[in-house]
Amino acid sequence: MSLPPGSDVAIPVVAVLAAFDVWCLVDLARASQARHLPKWAWAVAICVWGPWGGLVYLILGKDRTAASVPGTAPMAEGAGIAASGQLLARRVPADPVVIEVDQLTKRFGPVTAVDALSFTVRPGQVTGFLGPNGAGKTTTMRVILGLDTPTSGRALVGGRRYQEIIRPLHVVGSLLDATAVHGGRTAWFHLLSIAQSNGIGRRRVVQVLEATGLAAVAGRRVGEFSLGMKQRLGIAAALLADPAVLIFDEPVNGLDAAGVHWIRQLFQSMAAEGRTVMVSSHLMSEVALTADHLIIIGRGRLLAASPTDRFISGARQDVLVRSPRAGELAGLLTARGAAIRPEGDGGLAVTGLDAPAIGDLAAGHGIAVHELVPRHASLEQAYLDLTDDSTDYRAGTSAPERTTAS
Amino acid sequence: MTAPQIAAAGPAVPSRLVRAGDVLAFEWTKLRSVRSNYVTLIVAAMATIGSTALVAHAVASAPTPPQSGPVTALSLSFLGYAEYAVIPVSVLAVLQFTSEYTTGLISTTFCAVPRRWAVLAGKAAVTGGAALVAGEVLGFASFFLTQAMLSGRHRGVSLAQPGVPGAVLAGGFVLCACALTALSLGAIIRHTPGAIAATLAAIYGLAALCLVLPSPWKDDLGRLTMPFAAAQVVAPHPQPGLLSPGLSMLALVGWPAAALLAAGLVITRRDA
C-alpha cells in the first residue's frame, strides 16, 4: 500500500479534526435544547466517520490472504527441525550488515557494566561473544538493540542506531530472554502479534512455527511450555522476518541434545548465507564448535577478539619433560632461557624451548629423558586463563589450580 | 542501451500510516489474545448491570422518591457504573504495561517497535478504544435498565429530554479517561500492585483528599478531580458547585493527557 507524499501531514490533521468533531457532537448533544440530535449532525458524523472504516480495513487487511489455521498442520514435533534449513533460507540478504560497537560505556549508578568496549561483528560468520557471568554481555546486547541507552559511545547496526531502523525485525532478529513471554497467550498469538508489528504475514508465522517444530503446540498457552520449547519460540520470533543479523543471548540454555545440535547447525547455515550471527555464552564449550570468531570480554572490557583457530594457536603451550636427573636438566634449561615449573609428580613443565631443542640439549649432556610431550592448552583452558583475573564471582577463595601447565 | 535491472535491497520503506497500522495491529492482537482481559470485561459488565439493577429497584420500590427530577434519575444510572466498571477496566489498563514489564516482554515489544512513543500511542489507542466502547455500551445499558425500572413509577427520564443523550455519551467517555490514566501509571510504575494503588489514588483518592482540605481549596481543587468532573459531565444541566460542563470535560481529558505525557517522557528516557 503506497500513499501520496504529504499524507504524513494530512492524516494527523484529519485525525485531530475528527476528534474535535466528536467532541463538538457530544457537547452539542449534551447542551442542546433540541429533543433529538439535528439531522445535519448525524450527516456530518457519518461523512467524517464512514471513510475511516475503509481506511482501517486497508491498513489491517493487508497480508491476511491465505492465512492457514494454526495448529492444524500435520507436523510431528521433531519433523520441523530437520526441514528448517531450507524453510528459513527464504532470502539471502542483499546487503551484509555489520555490527559496530565503538567505545561503548554503560554505567548503572556506581557500577560500570561496560567500559570503553569496541569491537566489530562481521557477516558470513558465527561470532561467539564470551565472558564470565557479569562481564557485560547482556548489557552490550541490550545497547545494540536500543533497549538501554549507553552512557557514552555507540553501537551501530549496518551504520545506523537500532532505533533509527524502520521495521527493525527485518534487519535484526534477537533473542535475549526466552522466558520473557506472557504465559496466558498462545504461541500462535505471541508470534502473530510480533509479526504484525513489522508487517509480516500470517503465512510466515506458520512457516517459522513449522521450522522450529512448534506447529503442533501453536494453539497452547506459552505458560505450559518447557524452557526448551520457550527457547524455540524465541528463536522462531527472531527468525520471523528473515533478518540479516541474528543476536542471541545464551540460546543453548534449556535445550536438549537434539535442540543444541539443531541450533548449532542453524547458526552455521545462517552464517553461510552471509548473515551476521552473534551468539553470547559464558561457556567456551558451547561456542567452540560453532563460532568462527571469538570476542571475549571481562568486567566490561575487551580481552580478546580473534578468529577461533588463531585464538587457540596463540594460547600458551609448553613441554612436559620427565627425567631421572630432573634437577640437573632444569639447570641446563634455565641457562638456555627456558622457564621451568615443576609439576606435582616430578615432571617439569617447560616453556620457551620446543621439544626437539630440549631433547637435543638432554642428549648433548647425556641425560636420559623418559617423557617429552609437547602440550597445547585447550580452548577452554585458554579462555579460563584469559578471564581468570576478571571473574567477578568465584567459588572458594583461592585461584583455581592450574593443572595443565604454566 | 538497457541498464541492467537491479533488484531493490530489502523491503521498501513503508509509510508512517502503514507503520501506525502495524503498531495498532500489534497491540490489538496482544489485547485480544489474553483470556483474562475478556474475563475482566465480563466481570465489569455483570457487576455494573447487577448493581445498577439493585439501585434502580431500591429507588423504584421506595414509597416516596427521595428526590425528584431528571438529575437524580439520570445520575442513578451511573452509580453502579462509577465503581464496578471503573475498577476492573482500570486494572485491565494498568496490566497492559505492567504485565509486559514484569515478564520482560517489554524488551520484545521495544525491539519490534523501537519508537516508544509509538508503542505508548498504540497501547493508548487500543486500550482507550476498548474502554470507550465498553463504557458506551455499559453506559447506555445502565441508562436503559434504570429508566425501564423507574418509568413504571413515572420517575424516569427519556433519552429525548434535553441534555440526556450527551450526558450518557459522556458517561461512556469517563471509563476511557480512567483507563488511559491507569495505562500511563502502569507504564511509569511498572509493578502491578503499585500501579493499581496509584491508579485508585489518582481516580478516587485525590477527590477524597480534597474533601478534607480547608474551605477555599476544598471546592477549587475538588472540582478538578475526576469524580467531580465526571459528576458534571453525566448530568443534563450545569450543576451548582461544580465547574462548567466544558471545563469539566477539559478536566476529564486533561488527567489522562497529562498522565500519558508523563508516561511517554519516562519510558523514552529510561532503559527498558
Image: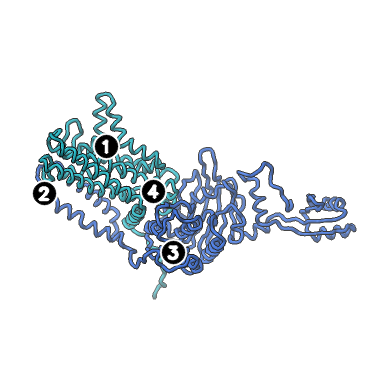
Chain colours: A blue, B cyan
Q: Which mark is residue A38?
A: 2
Q: Return the chain for callout 1.
A: B
Closer to us: mark 1 or mark 3? Answer: 3
Q: Return the chain for callout 3.
A: A
Q: Measuring from the top left, give residue A85's x and y in whole percent.
A: 50, 68
What residue would you read off at disc 1? B226
Q: Secondary structure at mark 3?
A: helix
Furthest-right residue in view?
A: A366
Amino acid type, mark 3: Ala
Q: Quadrant of the N terminus of chain B?
A: bottom left
What residue would you read off at disc 3? A216
Q: Secondary structure at mark 1?
A: helix
Q: Measuring from the top left, give residue B269's x and y in whole percent.
A: 42, 43
Closer to us: mark 4 or mark 1? Answer: 1
Q: Are marks 2 and 4 on the same chain?
A: no
CA–CA distance between discs 2 and 4? 42 Å
